[in-house]
């Protein structure tokens, strides 16, 4: 037996010593046998050892304890086993071991104090993978974040086992590999680290952690911190989300839509998909008249209804303003068109905001992916071109993209560019006579702009004015027109041919508020009397903002300028509102004439008569537009219209042609109505 052993008799006298005991006690057996231990080693009197020995004798049960023997200043481990002849005592010097344990404990206490000072949940893991110590933050994080699971582990527990409770299997595998590479193994150096980002399920959604494990000493202990980075992750995610979504509706925005479309187009073995561009009709008017708050509310509702209508996996995005786009996967042209019509039904029920019920409709452009379209921007601009075509063919329409639309889009772009350049110098004005229905005399002319395009020839206003409206070029164009036409009218008047000049003014100009000044400058420069100028405004342009319209019209009216409402019967303005404005003339759109003709051939048309009757009572003069046949002429005369305009009476023509033509009419008596109906008498006006 390597341990020291001796035996004592019931009186505490040495009965036996082995050689190890002799060595350890530094006495020979002959010296000690038969002597009482208290006498031989006086330092034992009243010591822990003696006390324990007495107890063993008292209850007959063995004892084991550590004992610091002062004369040697060393630690011993002592075991005492009682027997009928006294007791056997085994003891060994554990001083070295005891001291290194104490050192380690002190070191551990130091480390624990450092851990405690760290704000992040931190554990110290021993070389065997057990948690040696954990700080308060670690314990609290378990209580605050993950009360459902008994996480985190407590000292003594295996760290990696404890971590299975908060972590998914993949992250756990990564953690295991990383932590194992740091633990134990005296050859590996200190200071090596491993880090891992992971998330765990917290009571209010996922909690994100940044874990950092660092080997801190030679024995292979590792400090592991778990920093809660949930807020940073959320802030970053929020930002990422914001960059890709629309604030108002929460729908994906243009950037995200393009991303998704790009992915759909690039998908291997892709089946065709489509983009449907949805543009609300007349939404600007709603925003202007009901306010942006209601406008926003309506847009959110539209977003909601559209989202309900699409198939799972498809996407609704908002491009901004009143434009939405649906990305539909795996559908061909006819399926995409069917979807478009289904999306239109979303607008059948009016939308409501508070007490107000607002009917909405949308124009939808559909572009289906083709093999040659690989770029998301390309497909989106196809859908845009189709939507534009749907818009221009009237509200509430669906239009499918075709390459000719791309041609149209290219044309619009060319127009926009050219109008900004020299095109304004290529504009020409044609004049169409406006004729009095009582005596057939020419009352005046309407100025109609055309573009003398160097390659394409003479272009009608429809081909370029809508672009000019969009780009704002319509304002300088109209400014030029006002100068040109008033100058022309003043010249004709000086020549003995006074003709009242009607000029079309766009809504855009009206809301830009430079109209009053532009008119005044034109009148001053030309010297044309103000009452010889008529401004033609469409009813929709004044309906957009009636107060502003009224202000400007009153000022113009005070100068003496006349105001006509153009295309009456094509808009939806309130008659009461319209007639409260200071207007002098109402131009009845030719669609009303055509309608009257369809309803009752040979009759004057009750609608026409009613409108004319109304204008009469209000002291407003009426002009019938689009007189193409003698029957038209008869109808509008019978209805009591004051003036008329149309191909039967005279086509629009260039200024020089017009001057000759008027002279010719005068030579033939000046009654255009009679001349036109008798046929052939009116000189060809084209
Ligand atoms: P609008 O003001 O209603 O002009 C009348 C249009 O009807 C003219 O077409 C004219 O040529 C056409 N027209 C005249 N008589 C008849 C007829 O008997 N039958 C038919 N079917 N059509 C007839 P245009 O010149 O192509 O102008 C189209 C529109 O372009 C105008 O409609 C007006 O809204 C706009 N526009 C024309 N010139 C100007 C302009 O100088 N400034 C602005 N802002 N708009 C203009
Ligand atoms: Ca007009
Ligand atoms: Ca008109």
Image (cartoon, rainbow, N blue to C red):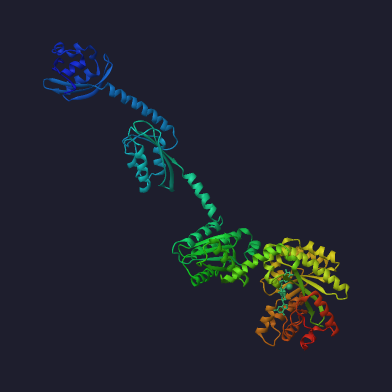
Q: Residue at x 39, y 31 (%)?
A: 112
Q: How many marks?
A: 0
Residue 459 visible, this angle: no
Q: Which residue is drawn at 66% across and 62% down?
A: 288
Q: In which quarter of the image is the C terminus?
A: bottom right
The quadrant where residue 432 appears: bottom right
**Residue at the left extreme, as displayed:** 84
Q: Quadrant of the N terminus?
A: top left
Above or below: residue 578 compared with residue 216: below
Q: Where is residue 496 in the image (x, y as percent from the top left)?
A: 88, 75
Answer with left or right where residue 112 lies relative to residue 342. Answer: left
Q: Where is residue 314 in the image (x, y as percent from the top left)?
A: 48, 63
The quarter of the image that holds ligand 1 is: bottom right
Residue 58 visible, this angle: yes
Q: Which of 669 and 166 is in front in this view?
A: 669
Q: Which of 142 and 647 is in front in this view?
A: 647
Q: Which residue is drawn at 79% across and 67% down?
A: 482
Above or below: residue 239 compared with residue 355: above
Q: Position of residue 668 (x, y in %)?
A: 84, 85
Above or below: residue 261 compared with residue 458: above
The quadrant where residue 18 appears: top left
């Amino acid at each position: 037996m390597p341990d020291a052993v001796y035996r004592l008799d019931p009186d505490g006298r040495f009965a036996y010593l082995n050689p190890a005991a002799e060595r350890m006690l530094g006495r020979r057996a002959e010296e000690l046998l038969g002597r009482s231990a208290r006498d031989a080693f006086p330092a034992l009197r009243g010591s822990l050892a003696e006390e324990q020995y007495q107890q063993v004798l008292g209850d007959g049960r063995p004892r084991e304890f550590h004992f610091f023997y002062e004369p040697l200043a060393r630690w011993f481990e002592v075991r005492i086993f009682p027997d009928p002849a006294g007791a056997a005592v085994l003891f060994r010097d554990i001083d070295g071991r005891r001291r290194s344990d104490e050192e380690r404990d002190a070191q551990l206490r130091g480390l624990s104090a450092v851990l405690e000072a760290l704000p992040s949940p931190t554990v110290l893991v021993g070389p065997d993978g057990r948690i040696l110590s954990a700080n308060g933050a670690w314990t609290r994080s378990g209580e605050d974040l993950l009360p459902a699971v008994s996480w985190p582990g407590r000292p003594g527990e295996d760290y990696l086992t404890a971590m299975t409770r908060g972590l998914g299997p993949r992250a756990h595998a990564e953690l295991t590999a990383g932590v194992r590479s740091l633990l134990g193994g005296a050859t590996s150096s200190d200071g090596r680290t491993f880090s891992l980002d992971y998330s765990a399920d917290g009571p209010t959604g996922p909690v994100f952690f940044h874990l950092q494990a660092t080997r801190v000493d030679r024995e292979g202990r590792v400090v592991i911190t778990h920093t809660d980075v949930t807020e940073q992750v959320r802030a970053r995610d929020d930002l990422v989300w914001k960059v890709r979504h629309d604030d108002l509706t929460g729908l994906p925005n243009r950037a995200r839509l393009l991303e998704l479309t790009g992915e759909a187009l690039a998908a291997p073995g892709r089946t065709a998909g489509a983009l449907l561009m949805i543009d609300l009709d007349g939404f600007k008017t709603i925003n202007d008249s009901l306010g942006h708050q209601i406008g926003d509310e309506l847009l959110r509702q539209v977003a909601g209804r559209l989202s309900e209508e699409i198939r799972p996996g498809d996407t609704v995005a908002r491009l901004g303003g009143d434009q939405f786009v649906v990305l539909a996967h795996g559908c061909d042209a006819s399926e995409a068109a069917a979807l478009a019509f289904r999306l239109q039904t979303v607008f059948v029920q009016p939308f409501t905001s508070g007490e107000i019920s607002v009917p909405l409709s949308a124009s939808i452009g559909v572009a289906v992916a083709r093999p040659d379209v690989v770029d998301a921007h390309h497909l989106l601009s196809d859908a845009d071109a189709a939507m534009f075509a749907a818009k221009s063919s009237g509200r509430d329409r669906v239009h499918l993209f075709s390459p000719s639309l791309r041609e149209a889009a290219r044309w619009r772009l060319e127009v926009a560019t050219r109008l900004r350049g020299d095109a304004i110098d290529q504009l020409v004005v044609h004049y169409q006579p406006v004729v009095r229905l009582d005596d057939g005399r020419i009352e005046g002319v309407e100025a109609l702009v055309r573009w003398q395009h160097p390659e394409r020839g003479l272009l009608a206003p429809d081909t370029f004015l809508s672009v000019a409206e969009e780009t704002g070029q319509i304002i300088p164009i109209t400014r030029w027109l006002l100068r040109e036409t008033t100058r022309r009218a003043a010249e004709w008047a000086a020549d003995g041919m006074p003709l009242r000049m009607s000029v079309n003014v766009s809504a855009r100009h009206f809301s830009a508020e430079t109209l009053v000044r532009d008119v005044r400058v034109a009148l001053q420069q030309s010297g044309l009397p103000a009452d010889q100028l008529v401004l033609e405004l469409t009813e929709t342009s004044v309906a957009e903002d009636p107060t502003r319209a009224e202000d400007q019209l009153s000022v113009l009216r005070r100068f003496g300028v006349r105001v006509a409402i153009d295309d009456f019967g094509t808009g939806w303005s309130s008659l009461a509102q319209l007639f409260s404005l200071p207007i002098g003339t109402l131009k009845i759109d030719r669609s009303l004439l055509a309608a009257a003709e369809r309803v009752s051939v040979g009759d004057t048309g009750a609608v026409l008569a009613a409108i004319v009757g109304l204008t009469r009572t209000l002291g407003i003069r009426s002009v019938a537009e689009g007189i193409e046949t003698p029957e038209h002429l008869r109808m509008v005369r019978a209805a009591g219209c004051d003036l008329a305009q149309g191909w039967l009476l005279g086509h629009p023509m260039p200024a020089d042609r017009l001057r000759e033509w008027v002279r010719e009419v005068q030579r033939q008596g000046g009654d255009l109505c009679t001349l036109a109906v008798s046929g052939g008498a009116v000189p060809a006006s084209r």
